[in-house]
Image (spheres, rainbow, N blue to C red):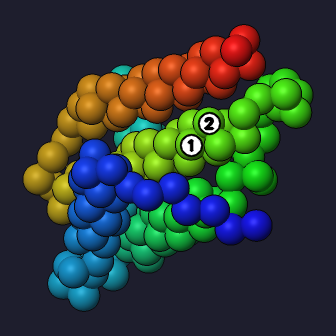
Amino acid sequence: MKLFINRTPYYWVLEILSVAGLLYAFYPLLFYGSLSPDVKIPIHFNALGDVDGWAGRNYLFLLPAISLIFYIGFSILERYPKFLNYPFNTKDIDKKELNKTGISIIRHIKFISIIVFAHIGNRAFNIAIGKDVQFGIVIFLLLFALFLIVTVFIARVYKLKQK
């Protein structure tokens, strides 16, 4: 059964920002043709943000493709919340509230995931062309935000179970 919970203005802003993040993920591809065939793109970073793995310029296609797959997958999943998996039996929980909470977490995870991949891809591109040599703390803040969102929504679902 397909379900659609109307978007509030907040969720529309989140969706617009997700699409903007998706476009940002594809930004490095605008410069693909101007890159030398032997340019190296960073593909892995250690905990300090130093590059410890390299690939050819075709790697630039990977992160935007993953972002697009995440966007499409999460957009479909938010329409079918019955496929969400919860860490406990949800048989006795109000389905409408459970679905609203599930759709909300999917929308938030979609946004953060796309921003994470767009950020990594653009940082890798900037490092490859010599504009940026620092990976920065932004990725850690984004991953912390993702962890925080998941934790808050799990707490919400547990609260629904208590009712």
- Can see residue 101? yes
- Can see residue 147? no
112 relative to 88 in the view: left or right: left
Disc 1: CA contacts within 10 A as few (<14), some (14-19) or many (>=20)? some
Q: Farthest residue to the left: give it.
A: 131
Please give the name of the residue rendered at 44% of the width and 42% of the height, measured from the top-left corner. 108
Secondary structure type for disc 2 = helix
| Residue type of the residue flagged with mark 1 | Lys
Vertically, is 90 above or below 43?
above
| Residue type of the residue flagged with mark 2 | Glu
Percent position of residue 57, x then y = 38, 73
Percent position of residue 91, x then y = 88, 33
Disc 2: CA contacts within 10 A as few (<14), some (14-19) or many (>=20)? few
Label 1 and label 2: CA atoms lie apart by 5 Å
In the drawing, what numbered circle is on residue 97?
2
Question: Which picture quadrant has residue 100?
Answer: top right
Please give the name of the residue rendered at 15% of the width and 55% of the height, measured from the top-left corner. 130
State the residue in front, 154 or 129.
154
The residue carrying mark 1 is 100
State the residue in front, 65 or 5.
5
